[in-house]
Every structure is written in C-alpha cells, then in structure tokens.
Amino acid sequence: MAAQLSPGDTAPAFSLPDAAGRQVSLADFTGRGVVVYFYPKAATPGCTTEACDFRDNLSALQRDGYDVVGISPDQPEALEEFAKDEQLTFPLLSDPDSTVAKAYGAYGEKEFNGQSSVGIIRSTVVVGADGAVRTAEYNVSAQGHVARLRKELAGS
C-alpha cells in the first residue's frame, strides 16, 4: 500500500482524462484550493451518494475557494454516463491503473461487509492554493462526509 499523505506534503501532480477525454491536471487549479476525492466505482450506491453530496455543496465550496475533482478507475465513457445521470458539474477523472490513487495513498487493502479486498479506498485530499496538502482523510463515509468537510474548511 502506498504511503498516505499528511498535511504539509506536496500534493502529487497528475494529469488524467475527464469524462469527455480532455486532460485535467492538478496544475489547472493552481491558485485555488481543490478537493480531490477518490471513489471506487461510478454509479454504485455509496459513490452516487458522495458525488451528489459534492454536487449539492459545490457552489458553497467554490465560494470558499475550493474546486472539486472526483477520481476513480472507471473509463471516461462510464464517467460521462454517471455525470449525465446525476447532473454532476465538476470533473470526474479516469485513473484505470490507479496510479494517481496510489500516489495519494488512496489504494490498498480495505474491508467491506466483512470481506477484505484491495482497491480504491474512499478518500479525500484537500490541496491548498499553494499545492500543499491541507487535509487528507482515508476510509471516509460516503454519507455526511461533505458537510463535515465544509465545516472543517470554513473554520480554517
């Protein structure tokens, strides 16, 4: 398992295709904060809950100076369908070999319903406008996570 990130670490650079196949890079957000969240699979119940929560809170996060990017191992076509079905208005990026997830410490052994497996660990990393990690949370809950994150970001 890759080492997890900590506040103060430099966020690993990335460039991945979005749902339309356009490359989106961490550098595109220079000068603004960005919430980079990793989720296991588009259009599954937990991932839909989390994505819709980010969608519903996007304008408030943007007012506070943060953009949102979701990253999963899904192919761009699946991301495009997910974004359309759920009216998601932030970039969803395709990381099919989990290279970026591994660099962010969001890949490894996890447990679900008593079963152990290896894959994407639902994680959120907040990168400041300076490119440094402000907060890194692993094994987050799909429900209620965004509200707690907003409180945390508003208080900092």
Image (cartoon, rainbow, N blue to C red):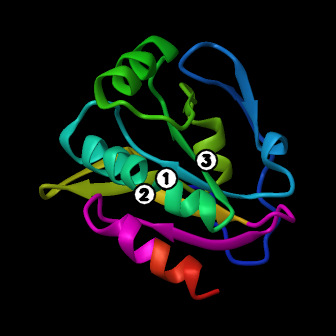
**Disc 1, SS:** helix
Say what secondary structure mark 2 lies in: helix
Q: Is residue 26 left or right of residue 47?
A: right
Residue denoted by label 3: 102
Residue under circle 1?
Answer: 58
Residue holding disc 2: 57
* Residue found 58% across the figure and 70% down from its top: 136
**Residue at 23%, 35% in the rendered image:** 44
Residue 99 coordinates in the image, percent (x, y) = 64, 37
Q: Amino acid at mark 2?
A: Asn
Which residues are the magenta region? 128-149
Estimate the x, y position of residue 7 in percent, counting from the top left. 70, 78
Question: On the picture, is 113 further left or further right than 48?
Answer: left
Nearer to us in this view, 116 or 51 = 51
Tell me which residue sits at (67%, 75%) in the image. Answer: 6
Work out whether 132 lies above or below 58.
Answer: below
Find out whether residue 135 is within the magenta segment: yes
Where residue 48 sits in the image (x, y, percent)? 27, 41
Q: Quadrant of the N terminus?
A: bottom right
For the C terminus, the image quarter is: bottom right
Amino acid of disc 1? Leu
Q: CA distance from mark 3 to mark 2?
A: 27 Å
Q: Is residue 110 above or below residue 76?
A: below
- Residue 73 screen position, x and y as percent: 48, 30
- Marks 2 and 1 sit apart, C-alpha to C-alpha, by 4 Å
Considering only vertical position in the picture, is 127 above or below 117?
below
Amino acid type of disc 3?
Lys
The crowding category of the residue bearing disc 2, from other C-alpha atoms within 10 Å (few below 14, some 14 to 19, many at least 20), is some
Quote the CA–CA distance across marks 1 and 3.
26 Å
Q: Which-is-in-front pick, marks 3 and 2? A: 2
